[in-house]
Amino acid sequence: MTAKKRVGVLISGRGSNLQALIDAAKAPDYPAEIVLVISNVPGAQGLARAEAAGIPTCVINHKDFASREDFDQALDAKLTAAGIELLCNAGFMRLLTEGFVTRWQDRHLNIHPSLLPAFKGLHTHARVLDEGAKITGCTVHFVRTAMDDGPIIAQAAVAVHPGDTEESLAARVLQAEHLLYPHALRLVASGVVRVEGDHVVGMTRQSGQSALFSPPLHGTFD
Ligand code: GAR
């Protein structure tokens, strides 16, 4: 097998997607290894997850920097020193400068809890419920300067259930995120997919998969 790609993960909080990546990367045939976790928030729960897995961690607190450029430079220096080849935002809640984004272009992934380009930004699930959408989901994409924007690598569709709250919907989407992110990182790290223009290409055609219907076509209704 070719060498595993060295992956850095950026977090700001809970780190459940980081955990999914850590767990997936334990498989001997997984094409990536998580070698560094950086949080911009001191004490983020994800830092403890990384430490428990024996992965080096680092806090780069944005509040310690006079400008976004200075923060991004410190981030870039740390990633470069660690020989990071691929970068994954996993609940990293900070916008990055154009210089940083350009430097890491097509090597930098983000996960967002909606079917992009719908519902970019914060409070995604509340807005999905407000709109009465019947299907939502999650997306892993390459990062571009605009928020939650960039070539889409993989998506999972998730049904919105009657009576869903923001919390119940977030939990259902999060389950899909934990499967989707390792899947998308595998596709990128193994070189199966690549960016062409604004699109990600290279994936194989699906067989035997049907559409997700919500409400279900043949379900029972209460
Ligand atoms: C996840 O739902 C992720 O999709 C979202 O933050 C959560 C982080 O959870 N990211 C965004 O909204 C980015 N725009 P986690 O810390 O448990 O992985």
Image: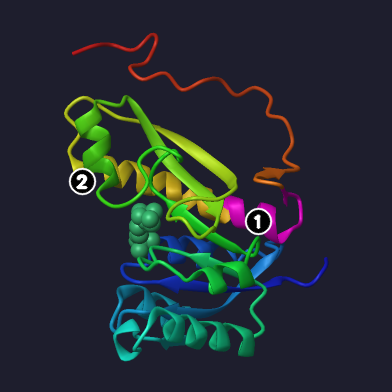
* Amino acid type, callout 2: Glu
Neighbour tally class for label 1: few under 14, some 14-19, many 20 plus, Cα within 10 Å: many
Q: Quadrant of residue 8?
A: bottom right
Quarter in which the C terminus is drawn: top left
Residue picked out by circle 2 = 167
Q: Which residue: 76% across, 56% down?
A: 191
Nearest the eye: 16 or 70: 70
Q: Quadrant of residue 128?
A: top left
Displayed-image quarter of ligand 1: bottom left
Q: Mark 1 vs mark 2: which is more N-terminal?
A: 2
Q: Secondary structure at mark 1?
A: helix
- Residue 139 position in % (x across, y down): 48, 45
Neighbour tally class for label 2: few under 14, some 14-19, many 20 plus, Cα within 10 Å: few
Residue with the most extreme right position = 1
Number of numbered discs visible in the structure rendering = 2
Q: CA distance from mark 1 to mark 2?
A: 29 Å
- Residue 1 position in % (x across, y down): 83, 66
Q: Does residue 44 lie above or below 16 as drawn?
A: below
Residue picked out by circle 1 = 186
Q: Does residue 172 lie above or below 4 as drawn?
A: above
Q: Which residue: 39% across, 42% down?
A: 114
Nearest the eye: 109 or 101: 101
Q: Which residue: 54% across, 58% down?
A: 144
137 in magenta: no
- Residue 135 position in % (x across, y down): 37, 28
The stretch in magenta equals: 183-196
Residue with the most extreme top position = 218
* Amino acid type, callout 1: Arg
